[in-house]
């Protein structure tokens, strides 16, 4: 008799816990995550080898300001980027930590200023892109490739991806309502992992075009491709 009562109580307790967990999960998944939209100004990613060539033997990057994404920072170091016919940008910020390839990310007007026909690419996709000369206080590095205009993208974690119904590699639309000029940016690449904060990166030209500083509302929605399927 007591055994039956204990089993029933145990079962009821388990059921209550499961219902509580389901309610919390449902509430969590329906909570709209906080969206941050950031302007990614021109910058450079460097390898350890290139850091030493530009700034001196044994030199490492000096973190100056933490970025929104954990573990990433704007370094105190800057370099000169030189394009064809000696056109240059004198102080381009280096971002850390270092990578296994060096990459220069520019806005369209930056590329025009340097005289470089920089293609729109997602970060890391540098095969066949133009190069440039990097000049630091200790030395210079000639990049054979790696100059791009970074495609707009959104960082998010897996919970955010579940909320929006997207996965890594999907595309979204960023809607920006502004008294100056409301804009919808399409083809925002989803870069989902386990730890990222929800943040869209657009470049300076895009940020100026939509008057981002004056925006009254920003919204991120899943993008449908023209054929009606989910892109």
Image (cartoon, rainbow, N blue to C red):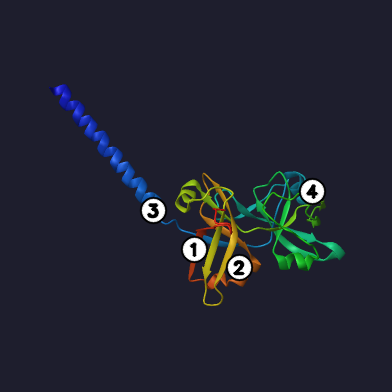
Secondary structure beneath label 3: helix
Please tell me which residue is depicted at 52% across the width and 77% down the height of the picture. 179
Q: Residue furthest front?
A: 227
Q: Which residue is mark 4?
A: 53
Q: Residues within 10 Å of mark 3 (few under 14, many from 20)?
A: few
Q: Is residue 203 above or below residue 2?
A: below
Asked which quadrant contains residue 58, the reply is top right
Please tell me which residue is depicted at 51% across the width and 48% down the height of the picture. 157
Q: Is residue 2 left or right of residue 24?
A: left
Q: Which residue is mark 2?
A: 207
Q: Are marks 4 and 1 in contact (CB under 8 Å)?
A: no
Sequence-wise, the earlier of marks 1 and 2 is: 2
Q: Residue furthest bottom?
A: 180
User: From the viewer's perspective, is the residue at label 2 or at label 4 nearer?
Assistant: 2
Estimate the spatial distance between the alpha carbons at disc 2 and disc 4, rounded to whole Å: 33 Å
Q: Position of residue 209 (x, y in %)?
A: 62, 72
Secondary structure beneath label 2: helix
User: From the viewer's perspective, is the residue at label 4 or at label 1 nearer?
Assistant: 1
Q: Which residue is mark 3?
A: 30
Q: Is residue 92 above or below residue 54?
A: below
Q: In the image shown, does 144 or 169 lie closer to the viewer?
A: 169
Sequence-wise, the earlier of marks 3 and 2 is: 3
Q: Is residue 83 left or right of residue 33?
A: right
Sequence-wise, the earlier of marks 4 and 1 is: 4
Q: Residues within 10 Å of mark 2 (few under 14, many from 20)?
A: some
Q: Position of residue 163 (x, y in %)?
A: 45, 52
Please tell me which residue is depicted at 77% across the width and 45% down the height of the picture. 57
């Amino acid at each position: 008799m007591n055994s039956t009562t204990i089993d029933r109580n145990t079962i009821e307790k388990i059921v209550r816990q499961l219902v509580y967990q389901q309610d919390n999960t449902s509430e969590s998944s329906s909570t709209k995550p906080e969206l941050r939209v950031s302007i990614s100004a021109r910058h450079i990613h460097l390898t350890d080898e290139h850091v030493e060539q530009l700034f001196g033997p044994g030199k490492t990057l000096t973190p100056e300001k933490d970025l929104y994404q954990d573990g990433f920072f704007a370094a105190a170091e800057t370099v000169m980027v030189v394009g064809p016919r000696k056109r240059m940008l004198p102080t381009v910020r280096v971002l850390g930590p270092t990578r296994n390839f060096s990459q220069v990310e520019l806005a369209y007007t930056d590329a025009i200023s340097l005289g470089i026909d920089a293609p729109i690419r997602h970060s890391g996709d540098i095969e066949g892109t133009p190069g440039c000369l990097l000049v630091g206080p200790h030395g210079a590095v000639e990049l054979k490739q790696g100059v791009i205009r970074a495609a707009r993208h959104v960082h998010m974690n897996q919970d955010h991806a579940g909320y929006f119904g997207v996965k890594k590699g999907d595309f979204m639309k960023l809607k920006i309502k502004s008294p100056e000029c409301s804009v919808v940016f399409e083809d925002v690449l989803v870069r989902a992992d386990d730890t990222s904060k929800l943040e869209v990166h657009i470049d300076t030209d895009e940020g100026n075009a939509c008057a981002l500083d004056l925006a009254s509302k920003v919204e991120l929605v899943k993008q449908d491709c023209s054929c009606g399927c989910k892109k």
